[in-house]
Each structure stands twice: as structure tokens, then as C-alpha cells.
Amino acid sequence: MKQEKPAVGTAEDRAQEFKAVTGGGGDTSSAEALLVTAYALMWVILMTFLYVTFRRQAAVDKRLGDLERALPKRPD
């Protein structure tokens, strides 16, 4: 019976030290740029949410005022 070679080398065959890759990965983004972008995006989303909320509240207040004026005054 013949033993087959493993597809991956043994532990002794593999490198035992760190070797930096040169020339690869030029399309990566820095963590700082991603953090600033995410932070800015969260502020934009928050400000948009607050703007929409205040506009809706103003519309509800106006409608409530119109309804209160339209109701006849009840005599006491």
C-alpha cells in the first residue's frame, strides 16, 4: 500500500517566521478613513432623522390646531 503525499506541507515544511508581502494590497482602505466616514455618516443619518421628526411634529401640531379651531366651543 502506497502512502499519498498530503496536499499541504507538514509543519516542518512551512515557514516558521513572518515574511511581509510586498507589492500586494494596494486597494485597501485605512482604518482611520473608514472610522471618520462611518462617524460622519451616522451624524448625517441622525440629523436627517431629527429634521424629518421635527417637520412631522410641526405638521401634527398644525393639524391639531386646525381641528381645535373647527370644533364648536362647548358651553359650560
Image (cartoon, rainbow, N blue to C red):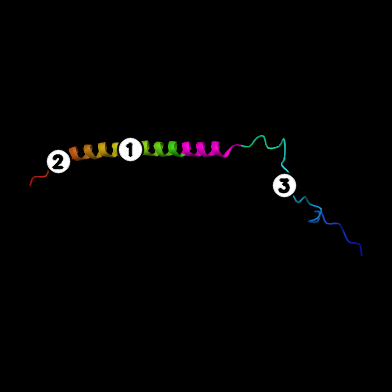
Q: Which mark is residue 72?
A: 2
**Contact, CB < 8 Å: mark 1 with mark 2?**
no
Q: Nearer the viewer, residue 70 or 1?
A: 1
Quadrant of the rendered image containing residue 70: top left
Q: Which residues are drawn in magenta?
A: 29-41
Q: Which amino acid, by three-letter code, is at mark 2?
A: Pro
**How dense is the environment of label 3, judged by Cα within 10 Å: few (below 14), some, or many (20 and up)?**
few
Quadrant of the rendered image containing residue 62: top left
Q: Quadrant of the N terminus?
A: bottom right
Q: Which amino acid, by three-letter code, is at mark 3?
A: Phe
- Name the element at disc 1: helix
Residue behind mark 1:
54
Q: Which amino acid, by three-letter code, is at mark 1?
A: Phe
- Magenta span includes 26: no
Name the side, left or right, on which 33 lies relative to 70. Answer: right
Residue behind mark 3:
18
**How dense is the environment of label 2, judged by Cα within 10 Å: few (below 14), some, or many (20 and up)?**
few
* Residue 4 in the image, given as x and y percentages of width and height: 87, 59
| Mark closest to the chain's N terminus, 1 or 3 | 3
Q: What is the chief secondary structure element of the magenta stretch?
A: helix
Q: Give the residue drawn at x 65%, y 35%.
A: 27
